[in-house]
Every structure is written in structure tokens, then in C-alpha cells.
Image (cartoon, coloured by chain):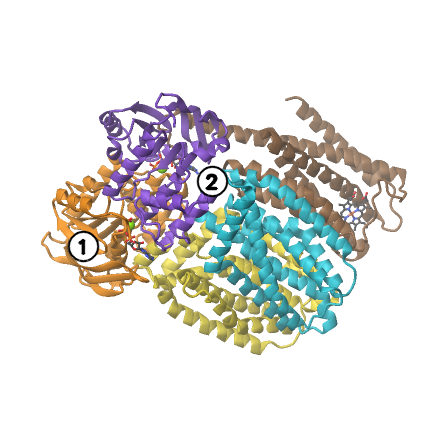
Chain colours: A yellow, B cyan, C purple, D orange, E brown
Amino acid sequence: MSAPSGITRVTLLKDLRLEWRSKDAVNSMLFFSLLVVVVFSFSFDPSAEESRQIAGGLIWVAFLFAAVVALNQTWAREIRNQVLDAYRVSPAPANSLFTAKVVGNFIFVSVLEALMTPLFVVFYRLRSLGPVWQLALVAALGTWALVVNGTFFAAMSLRTRSREIMLPLLLFPISIPALLAMVQATTAILNGEGARFWMALLASYDLVFTTVCLLLFETVLNAE
Amino acid sequence: MSAPSGITRVTLLKDLRLEWRSKDAVNSMLFFSLLVVVVFSFSFDPSAEESRQIAGGLIWVAFLFAAVVALNQTWAREIRNQVLDAYRVSPAPANSLFTAKVVGNFIFVSVLEALMTPLFVVFYRLRSLGPVWQLALVAALGTWALVVNGTFFAAMSLRTRSREIMLPLLLFPISIPALLAMVQATTAILNGEGARFWMALLASYDLVFTTVCLLLFETVLNAE
Amino acid sequence: MIENTPVPVITVTNLIKQFGRFAALRGVSAEFSGGKLYAILGDNGAGKTTLLRTLAGLNQPSSGEFSILGSRKFHDICEQVGYMAHPSLLYDEMSGMENLEYFGRLYGITSSARCAEVIWAVGLDPELVRPVGQYSQGMRQRMSLARALLNDPKILLLDEPFSNVDLHSAGEMVRLLAGIRDRGTTIFIVTHQAALLEGAADEFVWMEAGKIVERTLDLKRLENIGESTGESKR
Amino acid sequence: MIENTPVPVITVTNLIKQFGRFAALRGVSAEFSGGKLYAILGDNGAGKTTLLRTLAGLNQPSSGEFSILGSRKFHDICEQVGYMAHPSLLYDEMSGMENLEYFGRLYGITSSARCAEVIWAVGLDPELVRPVGQYSQGMRQRMSLARALLNDPKILLLDEPFSNVDLHSAGEMVRLLAGIRDRGTTIFIVTHQAALLEGAADEFVWMEAGKIVERTLDLKRLENIGESTGESKR
Amino acid sequence: MKKAFPILGVLTAILLVYALYQALVVAPTEQTMGAVQRIFYYHVPSAWTAFLLFFINFGSSVYYLIKRCATADIVALVCAEVGVVFCTVVLITGPIWARPVWGIWWTWDMRLTSTLVLWLIYVSYLFLRRFSSGGQTPLLAAALAVLGALCVPFVYFSIWFFRTQHPQPVMGGGGSIDPRMMHALLINWLAFSCFAFLVCWSRYRLEKLSREVDEAHAMQSLLDPGGRAL
Ligand code: HEM
Ligand SMILES: Nc1ncnc2c1ncn2[C@@H]1O[C@H](COP(=O)(O)OP(=O)(O)OP(=O)(O)O)[C@@H](O)[C@H]1O
Ligand SMILES: Nc1ncnc2c1ncn2[C@@H]1O[C@H](COP(=O)(O)OP(=O)(O)OP(=O)(O)O)[C@@H](O)[C@H]1O
Ligand SMILES: [Mg+2]
Ligand SMILES: [Mg+2]
């Protein structure tokens, strides 16, 4: 049996390769992000003063949407021919699978964000008063928070067909602190104010939820 | 062979019953739209006047993305055990299936809208200056536009690799005029202005696209 | 009821089906007469499923033609055809009875009695409330056969109906199908368990590499063909 | 290599598995010794798949216990078990070779040569670039068997490995499995084509309504049981 | 046919050079905007060419849906590809022009927006062609092309209200234009159309050839009895 990290790597590589092969990934992602930004521009006339004020929120909604699209299909491939069962009978640790999926989604969503941000900047004529690296950090932390929880709950809702329909709705209250921190931090940085507190909050949220998800994932995966 | 409308009815009833049993689509849509509302209310604390300016866009973006999440699952059940093949070898007309799916999605999305609207009203302290029935009409026309196109393109993207990402890629560009009309009409009515033109535009958009989709659906369904 | 005279109900002329650069059917020509039970045999990848799907109008042939019951357009005669595939073509979330009731409606069949009848016929219990997704593999297979029988078709296209069914019940299914054949239906059965059909089939059709290479009543002859070829699978 | 002495490698004690109100396994107790080939037979819905899944750690038994290779926790010995199910457990989008390379890594197998070897062993061509989703049903089945053989397991759990495979190749697969058994592996094969295993199996195990009702070497006896029961399926 | 291609090629080259000369030298410099205005001779002909190609795409898609004729499908594909390229040129020259003249790269103006939407529609068309697998691509693409073309009038209606900064149409509109400018514009348009036609043609031959190659491979696997198709 190879090291868990090795398994994470092959699983991640396999996912990335399939993704890459099946969809000329970058092109379609680029076009998708362009479309999202254009749809936003049509809905909120970007030249209006108000819409520029809510740009922080707008961006996060757009990212959230991209993340939901990604998370929705996380396990689709594994479910199709019950490949998950093949994973479960193998000696590979459950957490390797989880980590690979989280990292894969993180990469996917981050690329989308990286593509969308310049478009938003152009269309909404945004200009940050605070340091840009802080924005990038907030985006990374926030994306991680969304992706860890999302991947975990996506796995959970696979396993709990009709029993506990309300489970996906758990993600909602649980994600609220992260969302709040993301939006507040972004707005603060855009306006040149400090966002230390929110960033610390996000970081510790990430830490706690990553740990807990890793601890619980094996149970969730092996629940029949 | 029973009348096409009879087949539409049974298909619709079957879908509604299955959805009622599992509640997948409604849940994920609801979940997503809740997130959107909350993100916005965190990022922006609008006064009544400003919020009325952006509320139209906000609501419709939330609905659009929620609809995409729902539409992506439209055909999932039919694909699972290739049930679509059973439909294709039967004498039932393709358009009955299409109509049933469109009406089904229309009901889902409408229910969602009915649930979401009070939240928006509360969070944004909205008060319409124009007549509410007009808002309802715009919502119905707009939802129909989204749902007709979305169902059609979801069927189309079944036949492609990487379905989930394909749907927004196809749906968004063609829906832009409808989206624009919806947003403008909503904003106009909220501000107590006339929205005749937009409503007429929406209605004719609905008419044209419903007709053409009905004409083309059989071809798309039977494309191997 | 069709009389048992050899009027061809299905005529296939030089049928070719390509998937991209690969040809799964490489010129199939044949006539099949009404009221008979044909067993279609052949190695894995020979093109049996592809042939059946093409006859059922689910694949467009790349070239060549076929006519069923005198019609070239499948849609005109689809009410008289029953099709069963590898996948169950059933909704996992509904019970067997609910499934059949739904599919019955597509053919204009509104009576639950008819649905219950075919479910009994394949050896299941119409009152089972369990959704089809929780059936065992063989039960699902039977329910899928029941779906194909539902509209009392003139032509039955069955893709490996016995593959997960226990031997005893498979024998019963063969008897059931033979009875249906005797009432004038033409039946095509793709299977790897030719022995099951030894008494019942009117003709064995052996396919190889996208072609029909032998039609015979003598199963022994086919076994020799089967042995001599069928190395690595394409 | 395990010697061919009857040391029980699997012990099952009063295993019960309930799905809601329905009991799919109703008290299975048995011992299976190493290096043998067991054919598990039974009507549809008898609980064969459920038993196999439970042994593979994919189902939690409602009550009762079992130990495999002396361990009560499946996870400890999972490297020594190979499992093949009805669904292919393969990625439709990847070619056969890519699939095996991936699953090999989960077992710490990095050599492509080993993957190619098992693909040849089941009668396919490792160089086929077509994705598994475009294989014919029988080809998929073989590839699935290849996946189960990949880690050279001590215990093989196979759920209907021959069900869509042509007769000739099924015979070859039986010879392959018999060879593996001779090298000390314990093999469980759920199948409805008992005749295929007549020479090869060391014991036939007949299940009925969630219980093992007969273990014998004489296939004839089982046929009588099969005839006498197996009416409508639960 | 074989000879027509190089002849047309040479003619187009000459025409393009002549048009360049017309645009850069003969046409007078515009008073308010200055030399930037000369981008006009590329901006506008590109737009017209793109519109023309999209229109042909629509026509041949409809024809394909009715007749299922493979040639129509190739024509549709080729026109969409080349049309998107010309439309991209409009979307690039526009902002380059807008920056010095209006001081911004982009604004949600009626003409700009409609061009963008048009571009999005046809890019999504190309995506569909790219991603759909197997023999059904032409059908799906034709269906999308019809829907996309039907969408265009709605795009124009729905953005009618946008305040517009963009100049009014020169053709048929009220504005007067220097005849030399007009001349340069028309020459450029002719050159662009010839160029587009040339590109379409060679692309058409390429596509046809690659389909024939696929066909030949399939025929080969037909002949070869145990043909191992990889
Ligand atoms: C920023 C992006 C721009 C886009 C996407 C764009 C798009 C277009 C299109 C599609 C046309 C052809 C319309 C028709 O014939 O109906 C056109 C024509 C024209 N454009 Fe632009 N344009 C842009 C910027 C500009 C700018 C900055 C100017 C100069 C101030 C300009 C000046 C013109 C003129 C004079 C015409 C010819 C008028 C006509 O015949 O329609 N454009 N443009
Ligand atoms: N959609 C497809 N794309 C590419 N190749 C395909 C496709 N469907 C089938 N094939 C190929 O065509 C050949 C014939 O397949 P088919 O399913 O008809 O075989 P079969 O005779 O039914 O075999 P089996 O007994 O294993 O079910 C196989 O080599 C298969 O890989
Ligand atoms: N998840 C489940 N929920 C409820 N019932 C189930 C579930 N899985 C299996 N069953 C039931 O348990 C019984 C045994 O199923 P199992 O799949 O073990 O049968 P089997 O012996 O493998 O039959 P076959 O030969 O048809 O594959 C069946 O009646 C089936 O309906
Ligand atoms: Mg087959
Ligand atoms: Mg089973």
C-alpha cells in the first residue's frame, strides 16, 4: 500500500485529467466566467453607484454559484458505476479521497475566481484601496471554507438518500459565519480598512472545519 | 395510444410524485437561493430607496442560478437506467415529454420563487409602488422563458460530454434578452413606472421560443 | 393473429453502423419471418446489441436499410414492438407496479389489471411496494421483461433477458416466451445461454464481427464456430 | 501460499441483514475453508449479493458476526480481498488500462505490466483506447473481473462474473479462476450458470430466502431443490 | 475549381492592399477624432462581414434541419467559426477606438452590448459543436443556430432603451459622410468579404477532407474482418 499522500496525488491527478479531457477545461471555464459576469452586469447596471458598493457581495455570489456548480458534480463520477464501492474495499484511506476531492474542487473554483476577477474589475471599474494580496488571501481562505464543507456535505447527501433529506440544509447555517467573514473582509479591504479580525476568523474556521471533516469523513463514506 | 395531453399529464404527475418523495431539486435550489439572500444582506444594508433599484436584479440572479441548479437535474432520472430509451421506443410523442418537463420545472421554480420572495421583502424592506399583480405576471412570464429554454438546452447537453457546465454555457447567452426584460420590468414596477413594453417583449419571447423548442425537441430527443 | 407462413416481417439490407472510426455492424443483410423465435448468439462485441438498438430505432444506421412490418419508419409501428435492454429502463424510485402503470400510459394502456398480469407472468408479485432500485438484479431483469411485454407486441426485441435470472425461472421465462411466439409474435433474443433456448428457438443466428455468419437450427454447428474464433475482443 | 488443508478462512455466525422491515439475510452460519472454489447458487432475491456485500464490508450486518482470514474487521485484510459486483465499478470515461492503473495505485501497485497482464488474462486487449463506457456489456464484465484480480487477492468475491460473457469465454474464465484457486486463493462465485462450474467448483452452496439451505458437490440435488421452490419472488 | 482558389487568393490580396491604401492614405483625416478614426475602415467592414456570415449560418442550419445535407452542416460550421473571428475583431477594434475617443474601454451601450451578445451566442454554438460527441453534433448545432438567430431581434429590442454613445448607422441613416470615406469603406468591405470567403472556402475544404478521412478509416475497418479499431 502506498502512502496516503501518494493516493491523494493519483486520485487528484485522475480527476484533473478526466476534467481536462472531457471539457477542454480552461476554455469552457473562461467562457462560463465571462457569462456569469455578463449576466451580473445585465442585472446590475455596473455604472450605477449602488452596484459598485455591493460589488463585494456580488463577487461572492458569483463565486458561490461557480462553487455550487462544481460541488454538485463532485461525486457524480464516483456514483455512476458505484466506483465508490471499489474505493471502499481497497486499502486506500478514506481521507486521501476526501483530500483529493477538496483540493480538486479548490483548484477548479480558484481558477474560475482568477478568471472572473479581472472581468469584474473591468466591468465594475473596481479599485481596491487596501492591499491586493490581502484580497487574494481572503479569497483563498473563503474558497477553502466553501469547498471543504461543500465536499463533505455532498458526500453526506449521497449516503442519506431519503432518510435525512434536510441534511444539505445543514450546510447553510454552518456556512453562515464563513460567508459573513468573507464578505466583511472583502468589503473592508476594498474600502482600505483593516480586515485582520475577519481573516483570523476565516482561518480558524477553515482549520476547525477541515479537521472535523477529516475526522468524520471515513464514517460518512462507510455509512451504507 | 392516449391523447398527447394525457401523456403529458401522467408524466408530469409521475415527476411531481417522485420529486415529492425525494425533494432533491427543491432542496438544493432553496439552499442556494437562501445563501444568495444572506450574502447580499451581509454585504449591503440598503435603504428602501436604493434597495428598490437593485432588488430586481438581485431577485432574478438568485432565481436564474437556482433554476440552473434545478434544470441540471431535470433529465437525471431519465438518464439513470436509460429510461429515455423506453420513452423513445414508445408511441408517446416527444413533445408531451417536453411539455411535462417544462411544466414540472415551472412549478418547481415558481414554488421556489413563492418561498423566496417573502425573504427578499423582509431583508430588503421592499415595498412595490406599482401593482403587485403585474409583478406576479412578470415573474410568471420570465420563469416560463427561463424554464422553456433551460429544459430544451438541458436535453441538448445530455448528448454532450460534461453536461453540467454545458447548460449555463448554452442557456445564458440566449436568455439574456429575457433576463434583461425581467429585470427591467421588475425594477420599473417596483418604482411605480409602466412596464407594458417589457411585458410585451417577454410575452413574445415566450411565444417564439416555446414554439420553436416544441418544433425542434423531437429532433433533439432522437439524436442518438 | 399472424399465420405461421414465412412472410418476412423484418427485412434488413446491408446495414452498417459506425461509431466514429469503428464499425460495429459491417453489412448485415437478412430476412426474418413472422411468428418465430430467433436466438441471436455471438461473442462479446459482435454487434448484437447494436443490431437490436438499430432495429428499435435507437441508433441511426450509417448506411443500409431495414423495414419492420412493412414500414421503414420505426415510429409508425412502434406500438407493436417491445424492447428490453441491458439497463432496466425503469425508474429506480418507483415500485414495479407504478413503473408499469406509467409506461402503460405511454401506450394508451390504462388498466392496472394488465400490468399486474404481466408482472405475474414474469414471476414477480405486483404488490411488492419496494422501489425497483432495491430489487435484486434478477428481479429487476424480470420487471424489465414485463415492461417489454406490456403492450402485447407483435415483435419482441430482448437483449439478454436471462442473464441474471436463476436457471429455474429462466426456464419458465422461455416457456412464457415460446407461448407468446405461438400466438404469432416474432421474438428476437440475444443471449449467451443458447442451451436454454434449445427446444424453443426456431432458428439460431450467429453473429461475428458485425456480420451474421450463420443461421441454423443445429446448435452443435454453432459451437464449433464459437470455438474456432473468438480470441481477443475487439 | 496457503496449504490445501481445511482451515476455515471465513467463518460466518448467524448473520442477519435487514433492509427496513425486510430481512435479506435471515441467519447465515457457515465455515469456508481456504483454497477452494465455492459456487453460490440460489433463486433471484435469495440474498446472494447481500451476503457478498456484507463479507466485503460494504453492508453492516444487522446482527451476527463473521471473520475473514482470522480478522473481524474487514479493513485489516482488505488488501487480500478482490471484489467484483454487478455494476462495473469502473470509470466510464477512462480506458481499461487507465482504470486498472488507477485502482492499482490504491493497492500500491505501480507497474503497468501487472495491469496489462490481468487484462490479457481475462481475454481483452490492454491497448484498446476506447473508454470503458463504449465497451460492449461482456467486455465491461471482463474488465471488471480484471479489476478484482489486480491485487492478486487471497479471497475473491465475484458476483455473477459470467452473466453477459459469451459461453466460450466464460469457459476460459472458469479455467482461469480454477488456476487461481489451485494457487491457494479462496473463490466465491455467485452465478446462475452452475453448469459452467460443474467440473471446477469444490462445493455448491444453495441459498434460499436469506439462508444457506444446502452445501453439496452434487449439482443434481440442487436442481431438485430449485424446482420444488422458487415460486413468486419476495 | 482547383484553379479558382489561387486566382481568388491573389485577387483578394491585391484588393486588401488597395483597401489599405484607400483607408490610410486616400481617405481624409476626420476633424474631431483625428487619425484614430481610421480604425473605422476595419471596424465597420468586420461587423458587416460577421453579420453576413451569421446570416449564412442561419440559412444553412435551417436547410440542414429540413434536408439533412452534410454540406449545409459544414457551411454552417465554417461560417460560424469565421464569423466569430470577425465579430471578435469588432469587439477588439471598438474598445481600442473607444479608449481615446470616449475615455473608457467599455460601456453598456446598445450597439456594443448587442455585438457582445451576438458574439456570446455564436461562441456557445462553437462550444456545443466541440463538446457533443458522435453523429448527432450537426443536428444539435443546427437547432441551437436557429434558436440563436431567433434571439437576435429580441436582443435588439431589449437593449433599445440603453442610452447610446455609439454613432448611428452610416447606411440609410441621416448622417452625411465624405464620399471618399464612403468609398474607402466600401472597398474595405469588399476586400474583407473576399477575404472571409477565401478563409471559409479553405476551412470548408479542410473540414470536408477530415470527414473523408474518418470515412475512409471506417471503410477500412469494414473491410478488415477482425479489424482492431483503436
Ligand atoms: C467598444 C466597442 C464597439 C463595438 C462592439 C462596436 C460595434 C459596432 C458594430 C457592430 C457596428 C456595425 C453596426 C451596424 O452597421 O449596424 C459598428 C459600426 C460603427 N462603429 Fe462601432 N463599436 C464599438 C465602438 C465604437 C467607437 C468607440 C466608435 C467611434 C466613436 C465607433 C464608431 C462606429 C461607426 C462610425 C460605425 C459605422 C456606423 C454604421 O454604419 O453602423 N464604434 N460598431
Ligand atoms: N457508443 C459506442 N461508441 C463506440 N463504440 C461502441 C459504442 N457502442 C458499442 N461500441 C462497440 O461496438 C462493438 C459492438 O458492441 P455491442 O454492444 O453491439 O456488442 P454485443 O454483441 O452486444 O456484445 P455483448 O455480448 O458483450 O453485449 C463493441 O466493440 C463496442 O465496443
Ligand atoms: N438496499 C435494499 N433495500 C431494500 N431491500 C433490498 C436492498 N437490497 C436488496 N434488497 C432485497 O433483498 C433481497 C435479496 O437481494 P439480493 O440482491 O441479495 O438477491 P440476490 O440473491 O443477489 O438475487 P439475484 O440473483 O437476483 O441478484 C431482495 O428481495 C431485494 O429486494
Ligand atoms: Mg450486448
Ligand atoms: Mg445479485
Asked if residue D61 is positioned above or below residue C52 in the image, the reply reads below
Residue B79: x percent and y percent? Answer: 46, 47
Which quarter of the picture shows residue A139? bottom right
Name the mark nearer the viewer: 2 or 1.
2
Residue A49: x percent and y percent? Answer: 74, 67
Viewport quadrant of the N terminus of chain A: bottom left
Between B188 and A55, the one lying in front of the other is: B188
| Ligand 2 falls in quadrant | top left
- In the rendered structure, the answer to whether residue B135 lies left or right of residue D30 reads right
**Label 2, label 1: how far apart the Cα atoms are:** 43 Å
Residue A78: x percent and y percent? Answer: 40, 54
Reading the image, the residue beneath label 2 is C107
> In this view of the protein, can residue A114 be seen by the observer?
no
How many marks overall? 2
The image's mark for residue C199 is none
- Farthest residue toward the bottom? A197
> In this view of the protein, can residue C206 be seen by the observer?
yes
Identity of the amino acid at label 1? Ile
Look at 51% across and 72% down and name the residue there. A173
